[in-house]
Amino acid sequence: MKISYLSRNDFPTTRSDFRDDLIAGVTVSVVALPLALGFAVTTGMPPSAGLTTAILAGFLAALFGGSRYQVSGPTGAMTVVLIPIVSKYGIGAIPALGLIAGIFVAIAAALRLGTIINRVPWAVVEGFTVGIACVIALQQIPLALEVGKGDGDRTVIVAWNTVAGAIESGINWRSLSVVALTLIVKFNFPKILRRINSDLHIPASIMAIASATIFCKALSLDVHVIGEIPKTIAVWAGKTVRLEDFSHLIWPAFLIAILVAVESLLSARVADGMVHAKQDERYQPNKELFGQGIATIVASLFGGMPATGAIARTSVNVRSHAKTRVAAMVHAFVLLLVVLLFSPLVSAIPTAAIGGVLIGTSYRILNPRSLRESLQTTKSEALVLIITALVTLFVDLIWGIASGIMAHFIVNRINRRI
């Protein structure tokens, strides 16, 4: 396995680049905090497990991975895979599960399997991006409406049942007003800065969250906030790993490894597309797999859970003008500081504001103008894009990619015969 060492280009070379990385890292950490807590609780693990994953995996994947812009941590897709495993084997199985999955991912890096993802047709990647953007937006409905998640094991079904439950119990207009304010500030603040020709570079997401928090405090709105942040993180859990558990955890760990590889590599590829990365700036797939494998092993053995590259947080990172992998490292460091020093301030942030930021980020990921251009290309490419997006949205991302690739080959074969 040939894994290149870190180069000078992996770190900021100017004061301006370091400032951009610093601001981007802080911005992503604000968005990542409630997600880390929420995904852990949803999985059935303590909130500290989510923070441990975001901090350890976020730092290690950034340091050893192959992408400049990738931000890693617990994700919604991983939660879907882990829930039945935790319900069957308990959270005590997570260290062994993460260890096996991480080894699988590292082996994939050694076998140079990461390069396969670069052969995925761009229409499939575009469709995957559209589907994930819709999934991310739908996942924010419980935060936006301040209700519990509806029943179901698919994103669309859960979203539908969540909305139905919210309507039945009464729409929470206070939380919706927070979402609306967050979106207004997020989309209009950059325009205001441009109009006044300001040299300030304040991320719109931070300003949106700050505005929503002040708004709720000023009007004494009774809205749900992040709340108390646990301070117990990175506790050694490797002692629970038993060799006799490996036999029945091999298959679940293999599925997790596939998810780690696919989601991380596609997220990194999408990030490169968002910044129009030059040839020498593009991510290194096998190096990225190696970093994700190390991150998953360490996070799982220290009380966390398997991690992947997170497309929502990665997109926030890109939109916040991150320049190098230092931004993701800063994100992990800020989360650690929040846990140790600033938890009272962050605990006051309305969860609806976080939902609003991620809905806005989903819109940015979707990029309607680029989507229209993609759909106006050849009909066959547009069909592949639509199939990939729909299966990703209504089933899951792995089936979405598989269906898109199959559709691509079928359509191309038909075109050759015509």
Image (cartoon, helix red, strand yellow):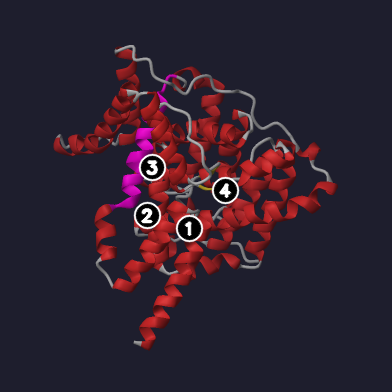
Disc 4 and disc 1 in contact, CB within 8 angstroms:
no
Kind of residue at disc 3: Ala
* Residue 213 can be seen in this image: yes
Q: Residue at x 65, y 68 (%)?
A: 111
Mark 4: secondary structure: helix
- Mark 3 and mark 4 lie on one chain; the one further toward the N terminus is 4
Q: Is residue 307 above or below residue 129?
A: above
- Mark 1 and mark 3 lie on one chain; the one further toward the N terminus is 3
- Mark 4 and mark 1 lie on one chain; the one further toward the N terminus is 4
Q: Which residue is mark 1?
A: 266
Residue 61, which numbered label?
4
Which quarter of the picture shows residue 42?
A: top right
- Residue 190, percent across and down? 23, 38
Relative placement, left or right, of 363 versus 390 is left
Which quarter of the picture shows residue 375?
A: bottom left
Which span of residues is magenta-colored?
A: 348-367
Question: Front-most of 264 and 411?
Answer: 411
Relative placement, left or right, of 346 versus 130 is right
Q: Residue at x 66, y 32 (%)?
A: 234
The overriding secondary structure of the stretch rendered in magenta is helix
Mark 3: secondary structure: helix
Disc 3 and disc 4 in contact, CB within 8 angstroms:
no
* Residue 327 can be seen in this image: no
Kind of residue at disc 1: Leu
Q: Which residue is mark 2?
A: 130
- Mark 3 and mark 2 lie on one chain; the one further toward the N terminus is 2
In three-dimensional space, the C-alpha distance between marks 3 and 4, rounded to whole angstroms, equals 25 Å
Kind of residue at disc 2: Val
Disc 2 and disc 4 in contact, CB within 8 angstroms:
no
Q: Nearer the viewer, mark 1 or mark 3?
A: 3
